[in-house]
Amino acid sequence: MSSIIDRIIPKQRKMSTRVGGLLIIVGETMFLFSLLNFLMITRLQYYSSGDSFMRTLFPHYLLFLAALFFAAFIGMWLTYVYVFPSKQRFSQEQSIKDDRSPMYNKVLGIENEISELKQIVLEISEKMERMDMNKDIDKDQGNS
C-alpha cells in the first residue's frame, strides 16, 4: 500500500529559504489586510438594503460585530487546540525526512557522541574499580 502512495506523491525538492520566507512575510501581512477587509464586509452585510435579516437578528451593528468576534474566537480556540498540534507534528515529521533538517542531523550526531562518551566513562569507571580492588588486595596482603 505504501509503495503505491510513494509512487503517486511526488518527491519534494531541497530549496533555499527565500521562497518559504517570502510566503511567511506575505502571510503575516495579509492578516492585517484581512482584518480591514472583514470590517468593511461586515458593514456591507449588516446595512444591506436587500437583506434585513442581520438587522432583525442583531438590533445594533456592534452586537453583530461582537457575535462575529465570538464566532472567530471559537474558531481560534478550536484551531489552537486541534489544528496547531497536528500541523506542528506534520511539520516536524517532514523536516526529519530525507535529511532535510540540519538541526535534526546535528542532534543525531550529538546523540552518537553522547553514546560514545558514555561508553568511555563506563570503561574508565570499570578500570578505576579494578584499580581500587587491586589496592585493597595489596593493602590486605601488606597487613598480613
Image (cartoon, helix red, strand yellow):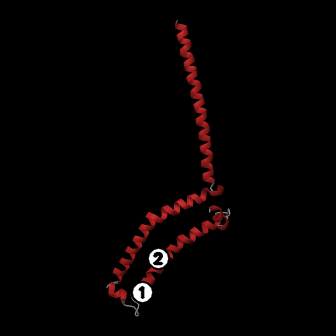
Task: Report the disc number at residue 45.
Answer: 1
Please give the name of the residue rendered at 42% of the width and 86% of the height, measured from the top-left corner.
45
Q: 111 or 69: nearer the eye?
A: 111
Please give the name of the residue rendered at 45% of the width and 64% of the height, measured from the top-left corner.
82
Callouts 1 and 2 close, C-beta under 8 Å? no
Q: Position of residue 87 (x, y in %)?
A: 52, 63
54 displayed left or right of 89: left
- Label 2 Cα crowd, 10 Å radius (few <14 / some 14-19 / many 20+): few
Question: Residue farthest to the top?
Answer: 144
Three-letter amino acid code of the residue under disc 1:
Gln
Element type where label 1 sits in the image: helix
Residue 76 seen by the camera: yes
Task: Report the disc number at residue 35.
Answer: 2
Spatial separation of the CA atoms under disc 1 and disc 2: 15 Å
Q: Position of residue 105 (x, y in %)?
A: 63, 51
Q: Position of residue 5 (x, y in %)?
A: 63, 65
Closer to the camera: disc 1 or disc 2? 1
Q: Quadrant of residue 39?
A: bottom left
Q: Position of residue 57 (x, y in %)?
A: 33, 85
- Label 1 Cα crowd, 10 Å radius (few <14 / some 14-19 / many 20+): some
